[in-house]
Amino acid sequence: MATPSDLPNQQWTSNLTGTSSLTLRTVPLPLPLPSCLGPDEVLVKIHSVSLNFKDAETVNGQFTHHKSISLPDEIVPCSDAAGSIFRIGAQVRRWQVGDRVLSVGVPDFWTGVLTEELLRGGIGASGKGVLCQYRVFKDYALVPTPAYMSDDEACTLQVAGTTAWMAMNGLRPLGHPGGQGETVLLQGTGGVSMQGLLIAKASGAEVIITSSSDRKLAQAKALGADHIINYKTTPAWDEEILRLTHGRGVDLIFENGGALTTVKSFNALKMGGTIVGIGYVSGKIDPPDERVNINVMVIKKNATYKGLINGPRERLDEMLAFYEKHQLRPVIDRVFAFEDAKAAFAYLESGGHFGKIIIKVA
Ligand SMILES: NC(=O)c1ccc[n+]([C@@H]2O[C@H](COP(=O)([O-])OP(=O)(O)OC[C@H]3O[C@@H](n4cnc5c(N)ncnc54)[C@H](OP(=O)(O)O)[C@@H]3O)[C@@H](O)[C@H]2O)c1
């Protein structure tokens, strides 16, 4: 086994001026191990990291809408990692060396409603991220990797998986996932949507998915999507959804789009339906000519419009049990080498991906 002094401990850093600012640095490990670890800390060897939209946003200095997240001048990006326990602190009982683990984005968020204080403790923005070869975690800031999944698959679960799970089930009682008899709209074919497709289909829902690409729509269809709409060639995709649902509208919408999609989402929603506000891939500022008072839209559809920031640990556990029960396998587009992290970020920003982009660390 390698001794700690043999370990080339490298990490990617960014000064938040864009993906070209990503720099690979060598940093010392806490030595000597394990006595340099706190009694409740573990050193994890990172194997795989998945990219999320927010990671590019953070590196570009644009992740600025949470008042509790203040970014340091230089960050280690990314929050989703799969790894294995390399060393444990003196009082650690949860883990043994070699256990496979996943990082948890907001480690102190166990149940209930997220607070600004909890959010401040998140990793990959205000807190050190996981795009590194080794990282120290509190022993409770990890969950076991599903045994049937590879590290590349499992490292996609924490942000994209939990967000999709919360969009489907966050308004339902814990332990009572829904979906049966419902029609769900997923916007785009990125990370959250593809986890949503897996979850919604395994839940018995009918799924409508939109994309800018016919190729990606064909891939989504092959994965079980019931209806596909190209939002570029069918800009009135909301009317198409009303046609597909015989004028009724959909029960639940993963609102990933933001500026260019929200008004249309309300049109495509059934009376009494739910829109889950997840993202803003089409922009954060509404076009002035499309501005409709949101209260009017909510009232008109007697809608529930629920904002979402990932989910608590109890929901992550619930989701992991669901994936295991249905043997779901996250959709991976491409795997990049650790040295090619810049190219992985550029690919994320190009929007060419279908599902998740992985960086293979070791
Ligand atoms: N609230 C939370 O807790 C949370 C958690 C995770 C992510 N998010 C947010 O959710 C959004 C998606 O994240 P992600 O990681 O899944 O992103 P991603 O993997 O980068 O996916 C982006 C996809 O969005 C689609 N898209 C772009 N413009 C669109 C439009 N006008 N209409 C419909 N789809 C459009 C594109 O799909 P096509 O190429 O198929 O057109 C693109 O591939 C981001 O805004 C992110 O910040 C929020």
Image (cartoon, grey):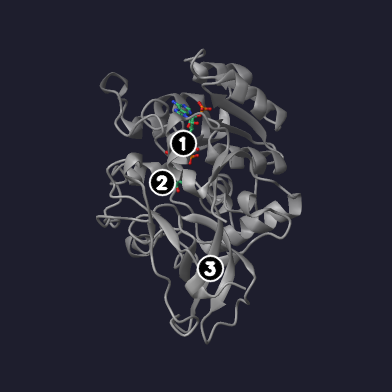
- Tell me how far mark 2 sits from mark 1, CA to CA: 9 Å
In the picture, measured across the screen, residue 214 lies left or right of residue 30, that is: right
Is 29 drawn above or below residue 188 in the view shown?
Answer: below
Q: Amino acid at mark 2?
A: Asp
Between the C-alphas of marks 2 and 3, the distance is 21 Å
Where is 217 relative to 236, above or below? below
Q: Of the numbered discs in the image, which one, if any, rests on residue 44? A: 3
Closer to the camera: disc 2 or disc 3? 3
Which of 151 and 275 lies nearest the eye of the viewer? 151
Tell me where residue 166 appears, x and y as whole percent.
54, 50
Q: Is residue 247 above or below residue 166?
A: above
Q: Secondary structure at mark 3?
A: strand
Q: Considering only order in the chain, which callout, 3 or 1, is on the residue closer to the N terminus? A: 3
Mark 1: C-beta under 8 Å from nearest atom of ligand 1: yes
Q: Is residue 216 left or right of residue 54?
A: right
Instruction: Kindly indicate the quadrant of the structure image that contains residue 173.
Output: bottom right
User: Visible in this render: residue 131?
Assistant: yes
Image x and y of residue 224, in percent: 71, 32
Amino acid type for the residue under numbered disc 3: Val
Residue under label 2, please give it.
55
Q: Residue at x 47, y 34 (%)?
A: 347
Disc 1 is placed on an element classified as: helix
Q: Are marks 2 and 3 in contact (CB under 8 Å)?
A: no
* Cβ atoms under marks 2 and 1 closer than 8 Å: yes
Q: At 62% across and 73% down in the image, what residue appears?
A: 1
Question: Callout 2: few (<14), some (14-19), or many (20+) C-alpha neighbours within 10 Å?
Answer: many
